[in-house]
Amino acid sequence: MLDNIRLEYYDSVDSTNDRIKERARAGEKQGLVISAGTQTAGKGRIGRKWESPKHDSIATSMLLTPADISLDAIPTITVVAAMAVRDAIYRLYGLDGKIKWPNDIVLDGKKICGILTEMEMREGSVWYVVVGIGVNVHNKSFDEEIAFKATSVDLELIKAGCGTETGHRNELTQAIWESFKKYYNIFITTQDMSGLKEEYERNLANLGERVRIEAQENSYEAIAKGINVKGELLVEVEGKEQIIRTGEVSVRGIYGYV
Ligand code: BT5
């Protein structure tokens, strides 16, 4: 079980995930969180970049050392983390984000958060896991390549007519890890989504709608049906159920990014 969360903050690091890995290899215990004001080499999945401009966004990573976890259950941790971020943003700001399977939170059709889970094996079993979360908080604009699909807490609060508050990065970071603890401890008892699936599906973007599955070799349309207990996406293609397993697949709505 995850109980003792310890928060460390640095003004600038390369990647908070990489700082956690270094500490894990040095024998650090589960529950360490490293957050940074900015990252000089923030990472997305499969070699993509994550932009974290100075003091505008949250870049935060936690070390987990789950005992006897199966390799299969590791990708599910991303799915659990997405629930936690959604929950924290809702509790603090009333912003009703949706989860874009597997690793994004979206608001008004744009990405507000990305999650990158990494792990290292030792002697044939999982040694440690790093869950890294990036959330756009005070960003008022984005680089050209992502401007059409990125948003922030402040931009969404302004749209909702709530104005903005200052200083919510730290409070949001704490809320995210508190929520993560709650969901992770439910997940870890069974190592699957059986206790969380229902809530997850309530907040899943595109549920029951047509989506485009973009795999490396091909791209096709399907209807999003929900998730299974492993946290894999269930879709229907020409009347047959299919399981979307890999995070290297992009799932998009038919119109636009979500
Ligand atoms: C992700 O990858 O969304 C995972 C992002 C994880 C970032 C956190 S920050 C703390 C920790 N330390 C790290 O080094 N990483 C983690 P992916 O699904 O591959 O999406 C990456 C894509 O999102 C990029 O190719 C851009 O198109 C877009 N993107 C980059 N920065 C963004 C931002 N700030 N807001 C919205 N979209 C962004």
Image: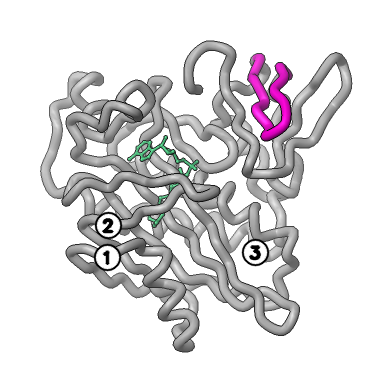
- Rounded to the nearest angstrom, the CA distance separating label 2 from label 1 is 6 Å
Image quadrant in which you'd find residue 235: top right
Relative to residue 29, is residue 116 depicted above or below?
Answer: above
- Rounded to the nearest angstrom, the CA distance separating label 3 from label 1 is 30 Å
Q: Which residue is mark 2?
A: 40
Q: Nearer the viewer, mark 3 or mark 2?
A: 2
19 displayed left or right of 241: left
Residue count near mark 3 (Cα–Cα under 10 Å), binned few <14, some 14–19, many ≥20: some
Label pair 2/1, CB-CB below 8 angstroms: yes
Upstream in the sequence, badge 3 or badge 1? 1
46 displayed left or right of 26: right
The magenta-colored residue range is 210-222
Upstream in the sequence, badge 3 or badge 2? 2
Check if residue 112 falls in the magenta segment. no
Dot 2 amino acid type: Thr
Q: Which residue is mark 1?
A: 13
Nearer-the-camera pick, 196 or 124: 124
Relative to residue 31, is residue 147 depicted above or below?
Answer: above
Q: Position of residue 63 (x, y in %)?
A: 47, 71
Does dot 1 land on a helix, a strand or a loop?
strand
Q: Which residue is mark 3?
A: 188
Upstream in the sequence, badge 2 or badge 1? 1
- Rounded to the nearest angstrom, the CA distance separating label 3 from label 2 is 33 Å
Residue count near mark 1 (Cα–Cα under 10 Å), binned few <14, some 14–19, many ≥20: many
Q: Position of residue 238 (x, y in %)?
A: 85, 14
Nearer-the-camera pick, 112 or 192: 112
Dot 3 amino acid type: Ile
Does dot 3 land on a helix, a strand or a loop?
helix
